[in-house]
Image (cartoon, rainbow, N blue to C red):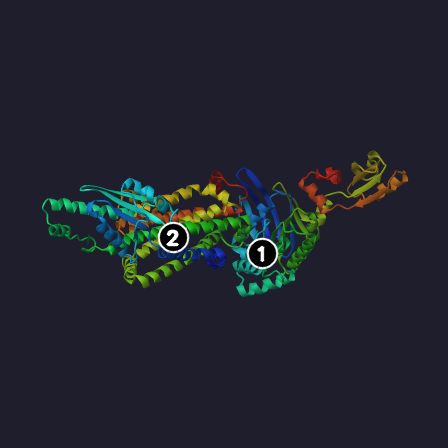
Amino acid sequence: MYAALELDRVTKRYGAVTAVDDLSFTARKGRILGFLGPNGAGKTSTLRMVLGLSAVSAGRIDVLGAPDGRSVRDRIGFLPEERGLYRRMTPVEAIVFLAGLKGVPAGEARRRARTMLEDQGLGEAQNRQIRQLSKGMAQKVQLIAAIVHRPELVILDEPFSGLDPVNQQTLETVIRDLAEGGATVVFSTHVMQHAERLCEHVVLLAKGRKAFDGGVAEARSSVPRALVLEGALEAGAAGALPGVASVASQPLEGGGWRHVCALRAGANGQEALKTAFAEGLDIQRFELREPTLHDAFIVLTGETPSPETAFTGEAAA
Amino acid sequence: MRRLLQIAAREYVAYVRTVGFWLSMLALPLGMALVMGASGYMEASAPPPAIVLIDQTPGQLYLKPVSEALTRRGKASGRPRHDLVAPPLALPDDPAAIGAALKPWLAGDSRLDNRRKLSAAFVIHGQGEAVSVDVWTENPLLGATEAVRTTIADRMERARLEAAGVSSDLLTAARALRPTVTDFSPKTSQKASLVNRLPGVIGFGAAMLLWSVIFTGAGILLNGVIEEKSSKVLEVLLSSATVPEILFGKILGVAGVTFTVLGVWGAVGGALLGVFAPAQAADVGRVLLGNGLVFYFAFYLVCGYLMYASVFTAIGSFCETTREAQTLLGPIMILLTIPVIFLSQALRRPDTPALEVLSWIPPFTPFMMTARAASNPPLWQVIGTGVIMLVTVALVMWIAGRAFRAGALSTGKVDFKGLVAKLRGGE
């Protein structure tokens, strides 16, 4: 089977509110799919439908060959956005209990729990009550509980939220290891850097509708490259340079301007720089900036652009 | 089923290993032992109240019989109930002045020998058929007063009858006359005894037991679910097990906790009864097993617990704090107080029409039918209320399942209107 997860024109309504509107995408087996969107875009609603926690209003879902996650819940690992564990249990007890619900025998679950806790640097904490652990440690315990039964499909809802940079890095490693082990990983986030580092395939959601579905490189290409010029030159001069489509300017504290020049498709910025220097424009600093997934996210989801990305108006249109 | 049992086991272990569980397990026996021990100790250690008895009637007609009557009161318990003492000072002749004279002793400002306080002074005065008793005390000794009154009344009555020519022997013989009264049980056509009342008492006890099981068990469930909801564990559980598995796993686990406590109490109580009152213990066993009452009780206990526990669990799934739950629990708590009001009536008159009517209303059926079961209600009522009970329990559990799913995934405060909307929508 090619797809571990497939959504076909899925809609979710809560009364008069449409949380997810006509959403279709596919998560391929053994790959990492980034499910991106701003807060309130419908990511959690979608994941809950996939898991069978809430009903689909319209459309069809195929999860590991089943119409929703309920009949294949033992093959799915889920980390919810709002995390919590039984506070008076020890990490081992909590993991063994949740693994037991997924069909892992207690002895085996205990062995795996201890190994995974050691791997995550929680060996010392495995017999302390969860309420005595730090938030980061508790989140690691919950992640282990979500994957201890070696699921084929791992669904992580905003897994990086609340983690410090070191633990974010650790989590990225865990996600890569899961995919290398053959699991399909779907994670939602509104922080693009993680998706950029982890995913080949991203789905962008905005206001319940799919804004983009494809590779990271393809998403980036939806945003033009930019030439950043700082100096005394005027916005009009910057806008007249060859290959520049639009300019967004802001004054610098010490005087002068910072112009972010959006380049037309195919323009590489070299021509514009050559012309600027040939014309003797006052340029103190320049930078050729490649678009990031963050830029693509802002453009594709229709979020209010920051000054740095204001030039992307034509791409958004 | 595997997941349901795992959830039940976790619930059970989670509570059993808390200090609160052991405290509640030991609270009743310890509390009873403490109360009994304390009252026994106080009884044994405190000297009997000191009483002064003054008879100012001509010839001190009542001094001896009243003294004997007060002394007799203590003989039944093997311990004197009063200590008749001599007045601590020479008392005035005027009865009205005696109280003032004894005031320092009665108030405790002055003490008798051994630092004892004078508890009361009985002053009998007057003559013929105009006899009065003044009781000076700050702590009315109702038992003593009644004994004094009855004894003097008896003497006055005897004096009147003797004056009318009735001999003392005849009077004593007449007073000894008693009809022979025998209670018969219409069910057994044999002499009624306390055993005949035992089923009613056991029914009442079982209904109160059911009430307390529901109250404590449902309370534990409610708080447990609120804690899981607030700590965001419920969503993890929902992704790992079905709603019925979670709901009934919890209900089963908490039932285990409640019945462990009750089982221990019952075993200890039964053992004590068996040791100290083996005949009564045998009677209780005969009633429970002989009439099949134990099966009625088990049926209504299971139905009642399932119905209320489902409702409490579902309500808990909507709430992140106990305060939020209080709003939704109001109507349920009112429902739960109604059976208590009527249960004592069921003990005295199990065939009262009001109880029959309440037996047909499902929220009250388990309590009312448990209490009435001992009085052999008509079979059609047993079957009819039982069927309605089963249908209601199934319906409540189905609605509770929907509510639990909706509540577990809901966020924010839910009012009653919102709750109904979520139930209708299923999420």
Q: Is residue A163 above or below residue B94?
A: below
Residue A33's x, y, as percent? 65, 52
**Front position in the image: B272 or B346:** B272
Going 67% across and 55% down the picture, which residue do you hit? A167
How many marks the image carries: the answer is: 2
Tell me the SS state at disc 2.
Answer: helix
Q: Is residue B286 above or below residue B339?
A: below
Q: Which mark is residue B23?
A: none
CB contact under 8 Å: marks 2 and 1: no
> Can residue B90 be seen by looking at this rendering?
yes
Q: Chain of mark 1?
A: A
Residue B373's x, y, as percent? 29, 51
Residue B238's x, y, as percent? 52, 52
Q: Residues within 10 Å of mark 1 (few under 14, many from 20)?
A: many
Give the residue pinned by disc 2: B115
**C-alpha separation, residue under disc 2 versus residue under disc 1:** 61 Å
Q: Which mark is residue A130?
A: 1
Going 33% across and 53% down the picture, which residue do you hit? B48
Q: Relative to residue B190, is residue B310 drawn left or right?
A: right
**Front position in the image: B4 or B313:** B313
